[in-house]
Image (cartoon, rainbow, N blue to C red):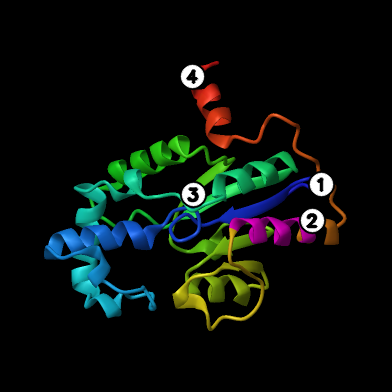
Amino acid sequence: MTAEHFILGVDLDGVCGDHTAAFREIVAKERDVEPSTLGEQTSWSYAEWGLDDGEFLRVHRKAVLEYRMFRTMPALEGAAEALWRLSDAGVWIRLITHRLYANWGHAVAVGDTVAWLDEHGIPYRDLCFLGQKPQVEADAYVDDAPHNIEALRATGTTVIVFDQPYNRELAGLRARSWAEVEQHVVTLLTQRGLPVQAQFPGLEHPEERLRGRVDGT
């Protein structure tokens, strides 16, 4: 890692995309019930929805391969805009996600992920698909999964907890919005004596910036 680069490792599900909302819709369809009958996700295991490990894997595989959840998932408010500002400020955005757990579905998962990122205008320099996040080098991370946060912090790494009901017991840096993530990262940059570049005027719309690059306009 060179001194001029600050690498931010960013999770996707529950951080950039609303995984809970997308999965709730699919579980409700599978059970032929209204989504509102499924309450808030308060545990990482979805036990409150009556899903054991086997049923979760079955429904989630169907969600990815048949419902194409990774292509249609709602984006969380402010994620793309904040990531563009951080990228323009000199931060190296490294997206890290564990989405390859559906056997024989990797092509769908990867293709839908990239299409979703393009559609929502989310910038990145690297896109990593793996489960063991401490294996990925970054200066700081943004994650929502309690087990990932604890594993990363055990290595002495800075982790910003993206606030979700299932991680409220965790202490340390916490962000309840992407505006707060941005504030934490800028603070980390200044603490390390790294320059923070301002975003040029007219670059405030992430979906237009990325679409222009893709279309060649």
Instruction: Point out the frontmost of discs 3 and 2.
Output: 2
Q: Nearer the viewer, mark 2 or mark 4?
A: 4
Q: Nearer the viewer, mark 4 or mark 3?
A: 4
Hey, which quadrant is residue 151 in on the image? bottom right
Report whether 174 appears left or right of 31: right
Q: Which mark is residue 196?
A: 1
| Residue matched to label 4 | 215
Q: Which residue is mark 2?
A: 189
Residue 23 screen position, x and y as percent: 29, 60
Q: Quadrant location of residue 209? A: top right
Residue named by callout 3: 128
Residue type (three-letter) at the residue carrying disc 3 = Cys
SS at badge 1: loop
Which quadrant of the figure contains the C terminus?
top right
Q: Is residue 152 above or below residue 212?
A: below
Circles 1 and 3 in contact, beta carbons < 8 Å: no
Disc 3 crowd rating (10 Å Cα; few below 14, some 14-19, many 20+) is some
Q: Disc 1 residue type?
A: Val
Which residue occupies the foreground of this view, 52 or 206? Answer: 206
User: Who's the residue at 28% across and 63% down the image?
Assistant: 24
Q: Which residues are magenta?
A: 178-187
